[in-house]
Image (cartoon, rainbow, N blue to C red):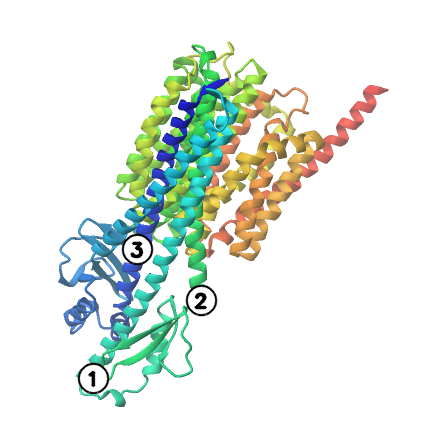
Amino acid sequence: MKIKKERVVLTIILLGIIMTSFSAALTTMSYRKLQADTVVHAGVLNTTSAVKKLNYSLSFGKPIDKFYGLKEVLEGINRLSYDINGVEIRDSEGNSIEMVGDISKNVRRTNPDEEYIIEQDGIYAFVGFDAGEIILKLDKGVVDVATKAYMSYIFRISTYIMLGVVLAAFAVCYIKGGEEISVKRMRVSSIIILVLSQLALGGLSMQRVDEAFSESMDKIAVMTAFSIQNDINEVIAKGVAFDEITGIEEYMTDIAADIPEIQEIRYVTGNDVSSEAMSTQSMEVDGESDPIEINCFYSLDLINRKRVNNALDVLILILITIFMSMEAIKFLTNHIEYKDSRADNKVYIPGFRLFIFVEGIAFALDSGFFSVFSNKMFDASKLPESLSFLGGMPNTMYSVSVLIGLFGCGALINRFGMKKTLTAGIVSGVVGYILCATAPNLAVLIFARFIFGFCDGIIINAVRLFAASQEDKAMHTRLLVEYMAAINLGVSCGVVIGGLIADATTYPAVFMVGAFIGILCVFLIYFAGFPEKQEKKKNLSFRIAMRELRFPQVRIFMFFAVIPLYMASLFVEYTFPLFGDEMRFSNSMVSGFLMINFMIIAYLTDPISDWVIKNISTRQSMLMYMVMQTVSIGLFVWTSSIWAAILALVLTSIWDCFGMVVIDSALDHVPGTVTEQSTLIQMVFGKIAMVIGPVAITSRLSGGAARATGVIVQALAIGTVVYGISVLYYSGRYKKLRKKVGK
């Protein structure tokens, strides 16, 4: 098929504008987060001495509300920086004890690990001490000014990049003669132009972010010196001359120990050689005619790690834009090819893929942090540690509703049709997201997650049943391939975008964005062209499907293979985010690692599963799958290291490329079983595993995420042994039976 050159140029330009704007918005949110972190970290430095004084005095048993001179301490903090607009102190119960400055708004953090909250009137930072917390109200103007400057910079370079896109589009379309070009040429040219433009934008963004990070380090050094200067002048004000003060070197060592970015602080000496890893600061000490100079030596390990993290954050955002660009191009070119052959009451492949892709984005936004958010909500409830399993209840109730949705989606499709059934699933997801965003406590969050679970329970299972109902095997395969590719690409984009929004704003904001995209999915259902009824005349019955359990091989497979393997899938979306939170990874960084999982499955499932199916028997593949999962996750549990966790994430993704394909046909060799029925039972047992898994993991979470993951390894190990023995036993029986029949 040929397309007019003018339409191709216009399409490339429009896609370039949309994707460049989207990429610029993502990187701007990331940059704003970096600036807010800088303001908060610099502001918190001003409380270092006050926290030491409070903890020292309270160690003698004095209650915080009886602390003499508390207001003077807060006023001293308030004077330290022009960025500080107000200071408040609260006790361990959250009651306000004292406040100074403009901090009239009652802002409270929803969980103990929340560093700060951005409000319209400022940034509220939280600093804990032994008997409560200090709340700083910081000026947001610095962040706003820096963000506006970055937006101006991004607008300029985006304009230059778009000019390059326009020139490249004209060059590609008009270098050769003719009025039209092929769809294939359009697809390849568009992908190359947009990918190169996004890489250029990413490189320039990365450079600006690195410059901002260097400036943030200098600001921390300035605030550190100012804090030391203030403490020294407080001592001098009490009548002690500067040259009579002892222990200043030890004091500066203690200060450096409380500041991760600073490795060492000492007086300037002639032996110090100026470098990027050192900042020289002058202090105006009362009574001294000349400034006192100190050197703040930065922590190179932390600097390098943060620079790598910043670079990865930008790179991940650009990759997400590239993937979305490629998906948009694929949709447009497929739409051009298929639009003339579109038929009523028949699924439209380009629309089907677009719906699945957008749905994957919408309802995966919270995948990278929800387990963390759920456990933080539990911490905020101040329930006893013996009830820690409640932290996993939102995930458990989500899995319960998914299971209910699995049982009910077949009946819904038979009675109302695919369009109405999918619409009901989307609506439950939107309502669940809104309830999650407004949940005031853990109980409401559990209920919200239960409502949200019907979304996946209906949509995912309805699509799989719809594909299984196709009498045309080619269409059945095509739908599954398009589904696996689109859902994994959508989820990979959604999980990163959600993580970034959570870092830049709040968790509730992510849920509201998801609800908005979910509403868009309702319209895409109709564009996908789902028919009203299933193709098969005979409805799928759960009652009939349950008869498959009369076979002992089926029971062994369900209890000792399906349940452990589905529990193992929780490592990616449940325990890895928890481990990332323990390691102080940002939400966007955790989401970036999870993106690796989805990308591997999206792009490698076809070649890996094809090779395995052709060269290894189903039972051997299943056994190999279980062994590899046990070893990969077991390595993480044994070492509890970051690299083992990342390696396990990658390896489990590779094994899933063939494991989650052969698992549907693992019982084909059992005489009397029906693949469609056994697949339905497998889906049920898989959801049961997803119900019990979060509770089993969370109940062991006090020992750390790695130790909690040990329950998965135990289930896999037991399942592997039992399933392996059953494979050997029944293989032997079948051989004897064949010999007997042969005789």
Which residue is farthest right?
Answer: 743
Could you say whether the residue bearing mark 1 is in a helix, strand or loop? helix
Badge 3 amino acid: Gln
In the rendered view, tell whether residue 224 sits above or below residue 481: below
Mark 2 neighbour class, 10 Å CA radius: few under 14, some 14 to 19, many 20 or more:
some
Report the Cα–Cα distance between label 1 and label 2.
34 Å
Task: Tell me where residue 293 appears, x and y as whole percent.
Answer: 31, 79
Vertical placement of residue 150 versus 284, above or below: above
1 and 3 marks in contact (CB < 8 Å): no
Q: Quadrant of residue 574?
A: top left
| Sequence-wise first label, 1 or 3 | 3
Q: Which residue is mark 1?
A: 236
Alpha-carbon neighbours of circle 3 within 10 Å: few (<14), some, or many (≥20)? many
**Farthest residue in the bottom direction?**
244
Residue 399: horizontal and vertical position, in percent? 43, 35
Q: Which mark is residue 300?
A: 2
Q: Secondary structure at mark 2?
A: helix
- Front one among 577 and 353: 353
* Mark toward the start of the polypeptide (3 vs 2): 3
* Mark 1 or 3: the one toward you: 3
Question: Who is closer to the viewer here, 81 or 542?
Answer: 81
Using the rendered view, name the quadrant where residue 450 is placed.
top left
Between disc 1 and disc 2, the foreground one is: 2
In the picture of the structure, the residue carrying the numbered disc 3 is: 35
Label 1 sits on what residue type?
Answer: Ile
Q: Are marks 1 and 2 in contact (CB under 8 Å)?
A: no
- 293 or 735: which is nearer to us? 293
